[in-house]
Image (cartoon, rainbow, N blue to C red):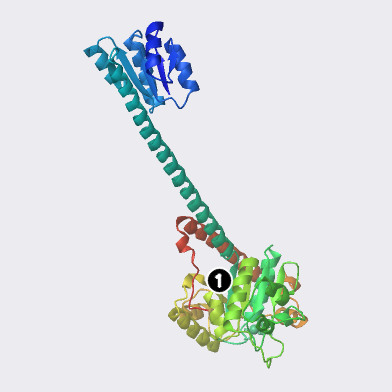
Amino acid sequence: MTAIVETDRSRLSVLQAMLHGSVPLESMDALGEHVAATPQEFAVVIGPSVPVDEAAVFSQWARVNKPDLGVILLRETVDAHALSTALRSGMREVVQSRDLAGITTAVSRARSVSNAISQTLEDETQAAAEAAARAALSEARASAEAAREAAERPTGRMLTVFSTKGGVGKSLMAANVAVSLAEQGSSVCIVDLDVNNGDIAIMLQLTPMRTLTDLAAFNGDVAVDAIETLVTPYSKTLGVVAAPVHIDSLDQASNEDVGKLLDLLVRVYDYVVVDTSGAFDDFALTALDRTDTLILVGTLDIPALKGLKLATQTLDLLNFPREKWRFVLNRADAKVGLSVDEYESTLGLKSDCTLVSSREVLTAVNRGEPLVLAYSGHPNSKAIKAFTKSIAGDAVHAAEVEEQADTRSRASAGRFRLRKA
Ligand SMILES: Nc1ncnc2c1ncn2[C@@H]1O[C@H](COP(=O)(O)OP(=O)(O)OP(=O)(O)O)[C@@H](O)[C@H]1O
Ligand SMILES: [Mg+2]
């Protein structure tokens, strides 16, 4: 459509008759109202009776607010003033008011320009909408991916108690550290990977209905059901995956099964405490692969020192980071002609927890009670509880560091692996 503004009525009727279907308006105010009510308007013809400055004010407004509206100025005489004002205010054309052919051509040009501008604006709007939709989609994908990663990321910490020497107090430490952590308010699961000689169930006076052997029944499909089936509860916050009762069982859990179980447990419990057999066997390596804190246990005697030295050399060869090691020196009061200092300097490790030989330890073990509960004021219980607190503190610190690293780069969130499970 075209609007015509002309204060002289007779001129207005002539122009209206010439521009078929146009809307006649007698004032600039009427034009303002008409344009506001007619968004599809593409041309405005401003007659010679309207002062050029008023026409310029309208044109400036239209240039910004309605760029597809063409303003055509009619003048009795097309002089330099009219032309320069028209140019500055963004009018499309200035036509001599008696040039009827010129006026119709100008209006038809305004229509073409308006169509082209509308199309461009439409394309730009569509492109902007598509870009916004794409950005929203990729943002949604990224946050879904982040949520999936967060769900799969282990929330608990894994502690593995290890030594290459038997009878040094690994199971004693595993049971008592786990009980202390549970007493301190964490949920804990002990996994007894000493499949030939597991003592955890006995030390906690448990009669497990299921053991690690039953893991084989899952045929590699280890899911949350496995936890409920395999864990023997000790208390509300402490459970045990016990070692097999019969070592001649035909079905043995594979390393992969054990790895999957540990990965699952560490997402469910605050702490998973693994007791090991005293050898670098496949189960121990599977656990070490996933371990956040390695608790090395040794007694103050030469054979244990020799065994531990060998263990530390092997762990170094496996690139197991030393900052994850904690060392427990058991029976540190033994009179064997070897001082704690000599022991530690030969081993190259300072003890983080020192226990003395004591009758109460044996009594508690024989009664099937954890030392930290049976004799909570005993020096060994105090030492174990303090050690456990420091491990929990390390865990909080490590979680904070991991979270910071995570925010910096999702790619750096991978856990340490010695080798593939
Ligand atoms: N500080 C101690 N004082 C007295 N007895 C102890 C002490 N530490 C461990 N024992 C006893 O030594 C025995 C072996 O301890 P434990 O079973 O914890 O060792 P382990 O390293 O797990 O042995 P294994 O390699 O056979 O699994 C247990 O009977 C335990 O009660
Ligand atoms: Mg043991």
Residue 197, position as x, y percentages in the image: 66, 88
| Residue 411 screen position, x and y as percent | 45, 62
Is residue 379 something one can see in this rendering? no
The amino acid type of the residue labelled 1 equals Asp
Q: Is residue 124 visible?
A: yes
User: Which residue bears the numbered disc 1?
Assistant: 352
Closer to the camera in the image, 370 or 160: 160
Quarter of the image with the N terminus is top left
Quadrant of the image occupied by residue 364? bottom right
- Residue nearest the viewer, comparing 24 with 175: 24
Q: Residue at x 44, y 13 (%)?
A: 25
- Does residue 105 appear to the left or right of 17 in the view shown? left
Q: How many neighbours does mark 1 have within 10 angstroms: few (below 14), some (14-19), or many (20 or more)?
A: some
Q: Quadrant of residue 317?
A: bottom left
Residue 106: horizontal and vertical position, in percent? 31, 23
Q: Quadrant of ligand 1?
A: bottom right
Q: In this view, does 303 lie above or below 203?
A: below
Q: Quadrant of residue 41?
A: top left
Point out the residue furthest to the bottom here: 248
- On screen, residue 315 versus residue 207, left or right, reads left
Q: Please count the marks in the image.
A: 1
Label 1 C-beta lies within 8 Å of the nearest ligand 1 atom: no
165 or 42, which lies in front? 42
Rendered view: 265 above or below 120: below
Determine whether 209 is above or below 403 in the image. Answer: below
Q: Where is residue 186 in the image (x, y as percent from the top left)?
A: 67, 64
